[in-house]
Image (cartoon, rainbow, N blue to C red):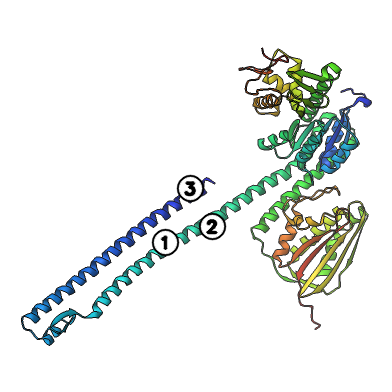
Amino acid sequence: MKATRVFQLTALALVLVSLVQVGWWLFDQRAYTIEKVDAARRAYNEQAAAAQALLDSGTSAAQVEALLPAIVVREGHAALVPEIETRLRTEERRRINQYAWEGAFFLFALALCIAVIAGALRAERRVREEQESFLALVSHQFKTPLASLQLSLETLALRAPEPAQARKLIDRMLADLARMELMVTQILESARLERGRVELRSEPIELAGAVQRVVSQLEERARAQRIAISSEIAPGLKVLSDPLALDVVVRNILENALSAVSGGGSIALAAQSGNGEVELAVRDSGVGFEPKDGARLFEKFTRLNSAGGHYGTGLGLFIVRRLMELARGRVSAHSDGIGRGARFVLTWPAAARESPP
Amino acid sequence: MNLKVQNAPRVLVVEDDPHLAAGVVENLRAEGYEVSSARDGEEAHRWLRGAPCDLIVLDVMLPGLDGFGLCQMLRSEGNNTPVLFLTARGDPADRVRGLEAGGDDYLAKPFHLEEFLLRVRAILRRWEWYRAASATQATAVLRFGGNEVDFRAFHAQTWNGESQELTEKEAMILKVLAEHSGEIVSREDLLERVWGYDVFPSTRTVDNFILRLRKRFEKDPANPRHFLTVWGVGYRFLSEGEP
């Protein structure tokens, strides 16, 4: 903030000094040019006077004209060739114009430099502000599981609970620790994604198989929560993406759906292709969200509702969005309202279908 | 604490994090309070309409209507239930915001269980005192200099016929001063009786509240006749007015 102010004042001073300097320089050059042109004019006038003297002393007009090429003799009077005055005037104007253009160009170049530097400073400040707000958000996100952890520990210390109650507290603490660990992993991951330090491959991936792998890993959890996962993806449908990124994206979306449906329900996956793209829709019968919040879901640390009682870090969907953008795809979320389920749509560029050998 | 269940103070815990909410609720129950919980501001607001309580433990960062918003809403509806804010943001600016929103106390996460329980007890004790001190017909109403203050309704009729709603803190300060009418009450005493010691960083807050009381009740707030400053010590309240 202070540095910006100093820069603004310095730039202003620089522009003012330069304006005065250029103004003075222009004035000086103009005066110099006029003075020189006047001197030349005086010299020509002296030539004309000399020619007149020669004529008066009896030298022939032809001789005078041969001797002094700038002089014409008309009816016994010596005068300057008319073009000379025109040339002098033109030269004077040309010089003054040249200086004006040079001065203006110098000022323009200076203004351009200042604008470029100011732009760079502004961009840097924006980055710094974003980092600061990110840090504030991160530390804020950590405080809730930390508070829960501390509360459980202090409860154990203060109340010496029965074994069953103690077990419950310990499970709660372990879950809090797991949540914090997940947050650390996701924060590092999202920071890496944000700086664009991720080299993603782009290769054809069979969507049905990739999705099935993720689903099979989550099946046990789904069974425990009485959630049915159905999948309708035509075999042979291929997308262009990084295999790891696709795995992370599908897993995040599915875990999100599992949390949203925590009390039992269904999750349906369906894929379709068209316009050189492949679309995977994940529909759940869970808590849903206000339709207007669809875009906000993918921002950092957005946790819209806790009605499902799940622990989001607020980073999962942000990571999904970044990964999809890097894979030249996109993601969107739709819901008819709270309690009415949600639909997440992932879109990748399609890979050419495998041609028969 | 040995509290009979029928008389147990009722506490509403508003916290969106299920673990933290469970921990707070269990501990308050173990202390003998009657505890309910809500997951967000709207749910809490609905709950409070049906069942009054003695204390709200309120998380600031809630989905939808946040803690500050809920507290302000309650106060504007004339609900003076004491509020203990829990928040992950512990910086002073936030603390001041919470107290301005009408909160009674403010605890930054993560907090110590025993400190939390102490603060809950302190807030309830202060309110118990206030209620006891306004229980009879004689103590419920204070008349001075043409003003009439109803401590139970947090309502005042001022000397110029204006009708004014008092905030709980204003009413409590007035109560403390009226109980010691004619005596000098130090700023520290006021702080302890009304807020508990460590909520505010300075005693200047008390001065601000006295200024507000003067503006409400003095005919000439610049030359107060009822709320007198005792330089370097505190304040003295005169119900008859300074001669």
Amino acid type, residue under disc 2 in the picture: Gly
Residue situated in front as seen by the camera: A9 or A329: A9
* Residue A3 image position (x, y, % from top left): 51, 47
Amino acid type, residue under disc 3 in the picture: Val
* Chain ID, mark 1: A
Q: Which residue is mark 1?
A: A107
Q: Are marks 1 and 3 on the same chain?
A: yes
Who comes first in sequence, dot 2 or dot 1?
1
The residue at the point 72 percent across, 62 percent down is A323
* Chain ID, mark 3: A
The residue at the point 87 percent across, 57 percent down is A341
Q: Which residue is mark 2?
A: A119
Who comes first in sequence, dot 1 or dot 3?
3
Against A274, residue B6 (above or below) is above
Query: Where, by quadrant of the figure, is residue A328 drawn?
Result: bottom right
* Residue B209 image position (x, y, % from top left): 69, 26
Q: Is residue B110 left or right of residue B40?
A: left
For the N terminus of chain B, which image quadrant?
A: top right
Secondary structure, mark 2, is helix
Secondary structure, mark 1, is helix
Q: Are marks 2 and 1 on the same chain?
A: yes
